[in-house]
Amino acid sequence: MAYIGLRKPWVGERKAEGSYAAPVPYGKAVSFSDTPSVSEASLYGDDGLAESEKATTSSALSLGTTDYPDAVKTLMFGHTAEGTEYAYGIDDESPYVGFAIIGVKKVDGVRTFEAKFYPKTQWKEPTISYATRGDSTSFTTPSTEGTALPDESGNYKYEENFENEADAIKWVNGKFGVTA
């Protein structure tokens, strides 16, 4: 299996248990990683390993995008807006949001679309850098890190593979509660 593409990050305000506001796009996907946080314990007895426990408790997320859209500044990071001006306060709190993204993979020559939905995530303010053009132009893009936490049913991620992107998008919309 090879991961060969990445598309369409979305975020949606998390409301009451399992419900969301309509999702908004978070720029175009440049990079994404999901690193599970594992709690481990070992029990030794009679001079050997008697029991071992490994359980995923959450997951560290990292997202690079082409843009840091205005729509996510209040939604994901708790900033306030007055018209087109945003105020970034030291007491702003990042609320919980639902997050989804579609990865493209290829297995035995067959391309599939792996949709991932994280029902409860919380994100840090993005890292943004600028560079002068000089003799050549280079792009810099924002990146942000977050945590996927378990929802009320104890799940921190849902995923499903699809033969085409349209079906993956339909599944993602269903997870956010969007119909049609």
Image (cartoon, rainbow, N blue to C red):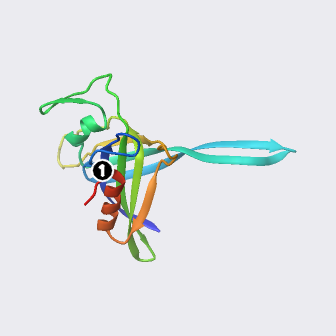
| Rendered position, 79 above or below 118 | above
User: Left or right: 10 with respect to 2?
Assistant: left
Residue tagged 1? 10
Residue 44 place in picture, x, y as percent: 80, 43
Residue sitting farthest toward the bottom: 109
Residue 10 place in picture, x, y as percent: 30, 50
Residue sitting farthest toward the left: 83
| Rendered position, 109 above or below 8 | below
Number of dots carrying numbers: 1
Q: Nearer the viewer, residue 146 or 13?
A: 13
Q: Amino acid at mark 1?
A: Trp
Q: Nearer the viewer, residue 144 or 168?
A: 168
Q: Residues within 10 Å of mark 1 (few under 14, many from 20)?
A: many
Residue 1 place in picture, x, y as percent: 47, 68
User: Left or right: 40 with respect to 89?
Assistant: right
Residue lying at 50% horizontally and 49% vertically, measured from the top left = 155
Q: Quadrant of residue 19?
A: top left
Residue lying at 25% horizontally and 27% vertically, measured from the top left = 88
Q: Nearer the viewer, residue 171 or 143?
A: 171
Q: Nearer the viewer, residue 70 or 117?
A: 117
Residue sitting farthest toward the right: 46
| Rendered position, 112 above or below 79 | below
